[in-house]
Structure formats: C-alpha cells, structure tokens
Amino acid sequence: MTREEDLIRIAKKLDKMVSRNNTEGAMDLLKELKSFNMTLKLLQETRIGMSVNNIRKHCTDEEVITLAKVLIKDWKRLLSADQSPSEKESDLKNGLDSSKPAASPPTEARSRKDSV
C-alpha cells in the first residue's frame, strides 16, 4: 500500500467516525499520522487535513483535539516552508502576509438618499 493510499484509508476512517458520531479509535489514527513523514503534495492530494480538522471539531476527547491541533499546525508549517523567499516577499508587498489572518474588506454604509 502506498503512502497516499494509507492516508486516504485513514481519512476515510476519520470521516466515518465523524458521520457516525463515534470518535473511538481516533487517537490511534492521529498517532499514526503523527509518525507519518508528511509532504505538502500528500496533504494536497489526499486532503487529510480536512478529515483531521473535522475530527477536531466533532470530538469531545481533549487528547484527540490537542493532537489534531498539533498535526494541523505542523502541516501548516510545511506550507510556509514550501513557499520560496521571493514568493513570501511578493505576498508581503501585496498585503498578503501569511502569518497574519486575512482581514475582511470594509463595508460601506449607504444612506437612503444614495439608494434612491
């Protein structure tokens, strides 16, 4: 079984746990993911991060939630490490600092007079 197939298998199991509202066994799967040598390509192709985030949102076990958060943070570091220095510089110039959350564009209030 390839690494990608392993990740897809784990993602399916995590998704099934969420849909059945039974997260028993999630800790074992997350530990398996923690020992996995993850790449940005694998993350994008398998979308395992989506499954881990879903289990984080729906689980009540604090240990599972904490491990899921750790995995997600580690994987986000892969994304920022993959970006070349020139891409980061370009993003900063364009106001797209990936280390800061994106701000919503301001909404302009219109008066009744403007809308008539």
Image (tube, rainbow, N blue to C red):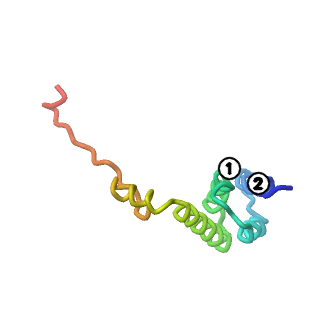
Extreme top residue here? 116
Q: Residue at x 66, y 63 (%)?
A: 59
Residue type beneath disc 2 = Glu
Quarter of the image where one finds residue 31: bottom right
Extreme front residue here? 86
Q: Residue at x 52, y 63 (%)?
A: 80
Quadrant, the N terminus? bottom right
Q: Position of residue 78 (x, y in %)?
A: 58, 64
Q: Residue at x 60, y 68 (%)?
A: 74
Residue 34: assigned label: none
Q: Secondary structure at mark 1?
A: helix
Residue 45: assigned label: 1
Q: State the residue in front, 53 or 80.
A: 80
User: How many residues crowd mark 2 within 10 Å: few (<14), some (14–19), many (20+)?
Assistant: some
Residue type beneath disc 1 = Glu
Q: State the residue in front, 40 or 14.
A: 40
Q: Residue at x 62, y 59 (%)?
A: 53
Q: Position of residue 47 (x, y in %)?
A: 66, 52
The residue beneath circle 2 is 4
Q: Position of residue 52 (x, y in %)?
A: 66, 60
User: How many residues crowd mark 1 within 10 Å: few (<14), some (14–19), many (20+)?
Assistant: few
**Is mark 1 in CB contact (under 8 Å) with mark 2?**
yes
